[in-house]
Image (cartoon, rainbow, N blue to C red):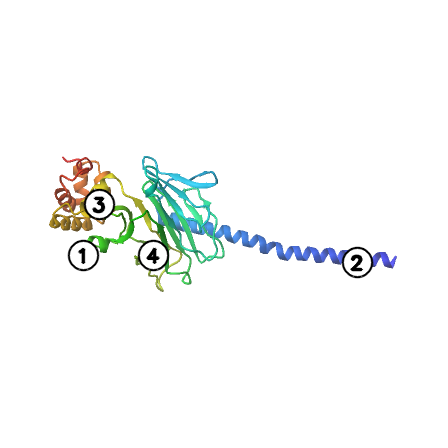
């Protein structure tokens, strides 16, 4: 009888010990998974609060890859399934113009998580910054979420460009006096084919944080100047867009050597006044009437339109009164 009780006692001790081990380790596993989900949710919320969802193309899944086809355009954006893989930008008309953007290197690579607004998030609890991608009607936004003061303050986006293409700052392309903060993809004929719009960054209170781009070879680096008053998380956004038909006509005008230097200098000045090459081209295509173009662009638009009169392709864009 004593032996039976001893065996029963040992069995109960073993069972309790096993249960204790399971109890101790199970919360750790659940907590890690929960922390990853929390990081993804926080990054998604920060990005969606700082950006507009009106121009996002929600990615679909094809053959295991996240893709977003820009309707009515000539390119397809393929969003990677992991942060270590590049965003592929496919030219439907000419494969020689395909390019890609590699995201900043996270400490721990992250798998893609689609959110309801179309934002694709890359994050987990091991990283001190999160990443997100938003395919848009014009191209793709690549977003950084800086979690705290210990996070990096500079982020590299490396491009695999078509042969003969390069990255050029607007200061180098338009002249330092006409710097718009943009970065251009320029082809072998010195014509702009794609644009990174001016850098921006916002903190958790919606305050803009000083930020700018630097270019080294085929790498564009966004530098964010946070300070003691910065409220985290901070969201920053290199926003790339392929140049459209009207933009191409303006780009050809300022990039070619077929026009008088004085006219090109004037055009560059007006482009700066309008907020950059991207904004100038969009004003031509999106404003519905001459009156609206003048209301938005004012004298700078009127002067730019007068300067580029006669350039092929611009007559349709401008829709003269």
Q: Earlier in the sequence, mark 3 or mark 2?
A: 2
Give the Cα distance between marks 2 and 4: 66 Å
Left or right for 146, reference 278: right
x, y percentage for residue 3? 86, 58
- The C terminus appears in which quarter of the rendering? top left
Confirm whether residue 280 shows in the render.
Answer: yes
Few, some or many residues within 10 Å of mark 2 (<14, 14–19, 20+): few
User: Which picture quadrant has residue 11?
Assistant: bottom right
Residue in front for this viewpoint, 20 or 219: 219
Q: Is residue 290 above or below residue 206?
A: above
The reply to whether callout 1 and callout 2 are in contact (CB within 8 Å) is no
Instruction: Judge whether residue 58 can be spotted in this image.
Output: no
| Disc ID at residue 251 | 3
- Distance (Cα) linking label 1 and label 2: 86 Å
Foreground label between 3 and 1:
3
Disc 4, SS: strand
Residue at point 26% right, 48% down?
188
Looking at the rendered image, the disc whose residue lies closer to the viewer, 3 or 2, is: 3
Pinpoint residue 160: horizontal percent, then vertical percent.
Answer: 36, 49
In front: mark 1 or mark 2? 1
First in sequence: mark 4 vs mark 3:
4
């Amino acid at each position: 009888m004593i032996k039976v009780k001893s065996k029963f006692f040992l069995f109960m001790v073993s069972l309790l010990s096993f249960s204790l081990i399971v109890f101790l380790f199970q919360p750790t596993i659940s907590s890690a998974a929960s922390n990853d989900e929390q990081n993804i949710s926080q990054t998604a919320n920060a990005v969606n609060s700082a950006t507009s969802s009106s121009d996002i193309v929600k990615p679909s899944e094809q053959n295991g890859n996240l893709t977003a086809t820009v309707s009515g355009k000539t390119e397809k954006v393929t969003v990677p399934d992991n942060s270590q893989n590049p965003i592929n930008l496919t030219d439907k008309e000419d494969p020689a113009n395909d390019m890609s953007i590699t995201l900043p290197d996270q400490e721990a690579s992250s798998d893609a998580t689609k959110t309801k607004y179309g934002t694709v998030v890359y994050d987990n609890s091991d990283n001190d910054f999160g990443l997100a991608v938003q395919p848009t009607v014009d191209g793709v936004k690549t977003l950084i979420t800086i979690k705290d003061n210990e996070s990096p303050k500079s982020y590299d986006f490396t491009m695999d460009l078509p042969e003969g293409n390069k990255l050029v700052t607007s200061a180098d392309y338009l002249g330092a006096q006409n710097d718009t903060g943009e970065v251009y993809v320029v082809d072998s004929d010195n014509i702009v084919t794609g644009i990174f719009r001016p850098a921006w960054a916002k903190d958790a209170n919606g305050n803009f944080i000083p930020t700018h781009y630097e270019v080294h070879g085929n790498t564009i680096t966004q530098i964010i100047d946070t300070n003691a008053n910065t409220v985290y998380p901070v969201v920053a956004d290199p926003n790339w867009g392929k140049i459209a038909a009207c933009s191409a006509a303006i780009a050809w005008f300022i990039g070619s050597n077929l026009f008088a230097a004085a006219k090109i200098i004037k055009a560059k000045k007006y482009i700066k006044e309008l907020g950059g090459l991207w904004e100038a081209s969009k004003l031509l295509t999106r404003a519905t009437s001459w009156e609206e173009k003048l209301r938005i662009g004012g004298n700078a638009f009127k002067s730019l339109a007068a300067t580029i009169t006669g350039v092929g392709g611009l007559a349709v864009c401008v829709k003269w009164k």
